[in-house]
Each structure stands twice: as structure tokens, then as C-alpha cells.
């Protein structure tokens, strides 16, 4: 009889202890740890790659357009920083005003900021480089998440060959013209 009572007390005590453990133990908090992951990607799609180098008349307007994306990496971790199994990629933002164009010649008559700009080709024939620098926002990482999504900027180049179509004025002189221009006749 005493033995049965004792077993009941022990079982009760065991259940109580497990309940206590469950109540006192904090739940495992999971949060995301971010890093920039893959670099920003960009490609100048207009003028197309097959038109590279582009032959334009000097002073001609040529629209340049870039396509781009930026994927950032995250991984789920516990409070001690240990991965708990889930990870993935998420798209970051590449705002219009984070696209800045430059060129080794010519100009940007409508401004040099944005995914699509007009490049006015250089006035002298030759090979030029039209470039765009792209940077990310980046999207913020809010607590309890940690890390950052800040990629370094990238530069994408496009080669442009400017062919001059201006007809050059030819200088021409002859003895006949010299006589014709002479007004010094003394008869
Ligand atoms: Ca990235
Ligand atoms: Ca980013």
C-alpha cells in the first residue's frame, strides 16, 4: 500500500517538474540575419548588345536603357546565432535616382539620372564609353532582424562609336580665283 502511494507521489512530482520546465523555459526566438548576398546585376538593353559599338551621327540623340536587379540573402537563426534551417533570397530596391550616367564624350540633354536617359553623341568621331552606376536603396533591416542589405554600387559600360557624317568644307584655291578676286586694275 505504501509502495503504491509512493509511486503516485513520484509521478505527480514528475508531471509538476515538466510543467515547471515548460512554463519557465523561454520560447526559442527565431529572427533573420541578412547579408547583401549576390551583387547588383545590370545590363544596358538599349541600344542592344548586337548594336555594340553603336554608330551614330555626331550630335544624334540615342536613348540608353538599363535593366537591373538586386537579390539579398537571409537566413533564420536562433538567439545564439545558430541557423535553424530556413534561408532564401529577397529582392532589394534599386530606385530610379540611384542610376547615374556618365560618358567620355557627348552630353545628356534631359539629365543623367534614371534607368533610361538620352545621350547626345559627341561632336567628334571616335570611340566613346557610356556608363551607368547603379546602387541599391537598401531596404532597412528592422529589429529583431540583424545584418544589412547594403550592396556596393556597380558600373555597367556601353561602347559607342561615333561616325562623323558632317561634310567637311574643302579649301580650294586657284590662280583663276586669285585673278578673279583682284580689284586692282589700272587699265
Ligand atoms: Ca544583393
Ligand atoms: Ca541590397
Image (cartoon, rainbow, N blue to C red):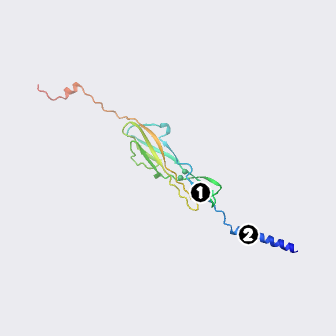
Residue 167 in which image quadrant: top left
SS for callout 1: strand
SS for callout 2: helix
Query: 71 and 3: which one is in front?
Result: 3
Residue most extreme to the right: 1
Q: Position of residue 61 (x, y in %)?
A: 40, 42
Residue picked out by circle 2: 19
Mark nearer the N terminus (2 vs 1): 2
Residue 21 in which image quadrant: bottom right
Query: 37 and 171: which one is in front?
Result: 37
Query: 113 and 153: which one is in front?
Result: 153
Q: Position of residue 165 (x, y in %)?
A: 37, 34
- 75 shown above or below 22: above
Question: Would you say 135 lies left or right of 180 here?
Answer: right
> Which disc number belongs to residue 33?
1
Would you say the residues marked 2 and 1 are in contact, meaning their CB atoms lie under 8 Å apart? no
Distance (Cα) linking label 2 and label 1: 32 Å
- Quadrant in the picture for the N terminus: bottom right
Q: Position of residue 144 (x, y in %)?
A: 58, 62
Question: Would you say 164 lies left or right of 26 here?
Answer: left
Q: Residues within 10 Å of mark 1 (few under 14, many from 20)?
A: many
Amino acid at each position: 500500500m505504501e509502495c503504491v502511494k509512493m509511486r503516485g507521489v513520484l509521478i505527480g512530482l514528475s508531471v509538476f517538474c515538466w510543467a515547471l520546465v515548460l512554463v519557465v523555459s523561454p520560447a526559442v526566438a527565431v529572427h533573420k540575419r541578412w547579408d547583401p548576398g549576390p551583387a547588383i546585376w545590370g545590363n544596358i538593353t538599349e541600344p542592344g548588345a548586337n548594336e555594340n559599338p553603336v554608330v551614330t551621327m555626331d550630335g544624334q540623340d540615342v536613348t540608353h536603357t538599363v535593366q537591373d536587379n538586386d537579390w539579398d540573402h537571409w537566413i533564420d537563426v536562433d538567439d545564439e546565432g545558430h541557423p535553424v534551417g530556413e534561408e532564401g533570397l529577397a529582392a532589394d530596391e534599386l530606385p530610379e535616382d540611384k542610376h547615374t550616367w556618365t560618358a567620355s564624350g557627348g552630353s545628356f540633354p534631359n539629365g543623367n539620372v534614371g534607368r533610361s536617359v538620352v545621350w547626345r553623341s559627341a561632336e567628334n568621331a571616335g570611340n566613346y564609353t557610356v556608363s551607368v552606376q547603379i546602387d541599391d536603396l537598401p531596404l532597412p533591416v528592422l529589429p529583431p532582424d540583424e545584418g544589412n542589405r547594403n550592396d556596393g554600387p556597380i558600373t555597367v559600360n556601353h561602347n559607342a562609336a561615333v561616325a562623323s557624317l558632317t561634310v567637311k568644307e574643302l579649301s580650294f584655291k586657284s590662280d583663276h580665283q586669285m585673278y578673279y578676286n583682284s580689284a586692282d586694275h589700272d587699265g
